[in-house]
Image: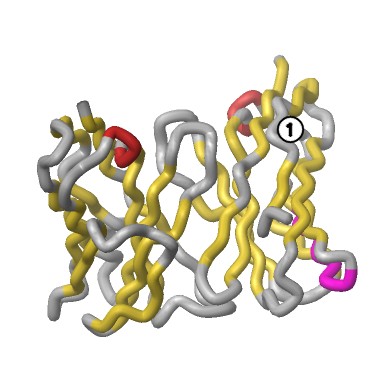
Amino acid sequence: QKEVEQNSGPLSVPEGAIASLNCTYSDRVSQSFFWYRQYSGKSPELIMSIYSNGDKEDGRFTAQLNKASQYVSLLIRDSQPSDSATYLCGYYGQNFVFGPGTRLSVLP
Amino acid sequence: DAGVTQSPTHLIKTRGQQVTLRCSPISGHKSVSWYQQVLGQGPQFIFQYYEKEERGRGNFPDRFSARQFPNYSSELNVNALLLGDSALYLCASSLQETSSYNEQFFGPGTRLTVL
């Protein structure tokens, strides 16, 4: 089993819709989880970190964590074409571990 | 404040050569980590340094080495380059030793092409 699994996409949503990105992980000891956005040819930029079960909201972004199900998700409300990018899910176990990323395409 | 900086931006080498990549962390950050990102994959952890000491190492061969200097900047060295070493090499800094609850911020990366 891979340490972090994400649907590679592409996930296509119309402008203004909610984009839902999902991630599952195998390390039950993990305490902290992170979402990064990476535009093509650029480096990852941190969107949000989440450490406790439940929801964490920051502007148009909401991260959801369920440690019992080993599942973390990212919701993007009112999606904009500028949100089109690859979204990387990661966690800190013994070291940082990243998933392969989900490519999101927001259609005007 | 300046973010994480890396040099060079791009690099082209031939098989068997050696390369040195450089990274300066965000001012005040003491931890630097290195990652390799192959096209279509997420970043793979190579090394973590904190206070000039290696604190973590990923599953990479001994051809990969790194060090951290007293000013917290860091170098990643790769010897005997292989075609498969072609990738984007990312440096990330964090305020303290990388651990849970400690966010990392990435530099722009160095694109290495091995011919």
Bounds of the magenta span?
Answer: A62-68
Q: Residue B74, position in %: x, y?
A: 20, 66
For the question of whether residue B29 can be seen, the reply is no
Output the chain of dot 1.
A
Image quadrant where residue A67 sits: bottom right
Residue B82, above or below B36: above
Count the marks: 1
State the residue at coordinates (35%, 67%): B47
Q: Residue B57, position in %: x, y?
A: 39, 70
State the residue at coordinates (60%, 73%): A93
State the residue at coordinates (70%, 74%): A51
Q: Is disc 1 placed on a helix, strand or loop?
A: loop
Q: Residue B8, position in %: x, y?
A: 16, 42
User: Which colour assignment does the render follow?
Assistant: secondary structure
Residue B15 falls left or right of residue A21: left
Residue A70 falls left or right of residue A59: right
